[in-house]
């Protein structure tokens, strides 16, 4: 039977950012998932979590653990992405100075999520928010 | 390279973690950009950095980096040390710059990732 973990993400809170990813990593290890797959899953989730913290006021992260696959949904009430194709280009960034000072915002988040996942769908509406759905087979 | 050797070569001090359980390190990567660290496919590296904030620790946890060398006399906060202990990495501080620490470690046999 599938197990589900859900987390609320607070926009702008860089102190808490990554806590959900950390908990998910522990859960994946408990499930005895191969360490390379664990890294791919948590890197993708952490990048998505950081995107919400960097750009949105709030968001929700849902992880479904099924045999052989981890399914992740990250939705936020952020500004939305005007041009998804452009956002997928390495180096394109709209991150603030504060985000860059934290060591992020180099325009590598979405390309890195794509690199680490087997399926990725991005839906976004300007002024409403963005939803990422991705799967990693393991 | 053993962690003890990294400590000796860079005049570092241990602020968190146990040297007994630390793996032997063969490669190093220098960056203040955590976005770069998240793209690495390698394990068992030392990250040489000047970034002193809590997201440094979150990033190395997610990226499976076992050893961090914080350069140029930057000081880890109590929150950073607590998190480093919780995730089980070896956290070092050195007075050397990133360039100097990296140069000495390279000269003594540590390999670059790229």
Image (cartoon, coloured by chain):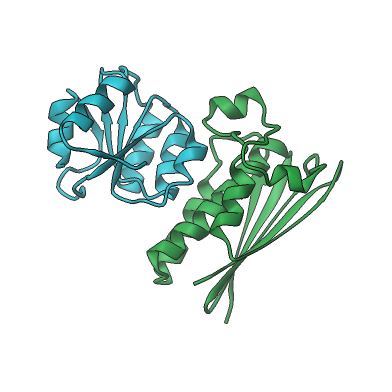
Chain colours: A green, B cyan
- Looking at the image, which residue is at 39% across and 71% down? A32
- Looking at the image, residue A45 sits to the left or right of residue B48; the answer is right
> Could you say where residue B78 lies in the image, as x and y percent from the top left?
36, 29
Residue reaching furthest front?
B114
The image shows residue B7, relative to residue B73, as above or below, that is below
- Note whether A16 is above or below B102 in the view shown: below
> Measuring 21% from the left and 50% from the top, which residue is drawn there?
B23
> Residue B88's x, y, as percent?
30, 47
Relative side of A23 to A118, left or right: left
Looking at the image, which residue sits at the far bottom?
Answer: A1
Q: Is residue B95 placed above or below B109 in the rendered structure?
A: above
Query: Measured from the top left, where is residue B3 in percent x and y?
Result: 17, 39
With B109 as the anchor, is A105 left or right in this view? Answer: right
Which quadrant does the N terminus of chain A fall into?
A: bottom right
Residue at 52%, 60% (x, y): give it. Answer: A41
Number of numbered labels in the structure image = 0
Give the residue at x 65% y 50%. A8
């Amino acid at each position: 039977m599938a197990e589900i973990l859900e987390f609320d993400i607070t926009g702008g809170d860089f102190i808490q950012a990554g806590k959900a990813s950390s908990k998910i990593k522990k859960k994946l290890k408990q499930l005895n998932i191969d360490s390379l797959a664990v890294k791919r899953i948590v890197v993708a989730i952490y990048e998505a979590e950081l995107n919400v913290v960097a750009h949105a006021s709030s968001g929700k992260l849902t992880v479904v653990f099924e045999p052989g696959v981890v399914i992740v949904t990250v939705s936020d009430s952020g500004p939305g992405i005007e041009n998804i194709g452009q956002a997928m280009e390495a180096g394109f960034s709209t991150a603030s100075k504060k985000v860059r000072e934290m060591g992020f915002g180099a325009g590598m988040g979405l390309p890195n999520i794509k690199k680490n996942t087997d399926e990725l769908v991005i839906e976004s509406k300007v002024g409403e928010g963005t939803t990422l759905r991705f799967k990693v087979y393991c | 390279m053993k962690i003890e050797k990294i400590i000796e070569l860079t005049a570092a001090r241990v602020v968190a973690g146990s040297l007994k359980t630390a793996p032997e390190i063969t490669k190093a990567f220098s960056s203040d950009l955590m976005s770069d660290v998240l793209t690495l496919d390698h394990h068992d590296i030392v990250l040489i950095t000047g970034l002193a904030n809590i997201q440094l620790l979150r990033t190395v946890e997610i990226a499976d980096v076992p050893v961090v060398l914080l350069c140029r006399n930057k000081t880890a906060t109590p929150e950073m040390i607590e998190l480093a202990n919780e995730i089980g990495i070896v956290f070092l501080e050195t007075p050397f710059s990133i360039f100097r620490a990296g140069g000495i470690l390279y000269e003594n046999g540590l390999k670059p990732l790229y």
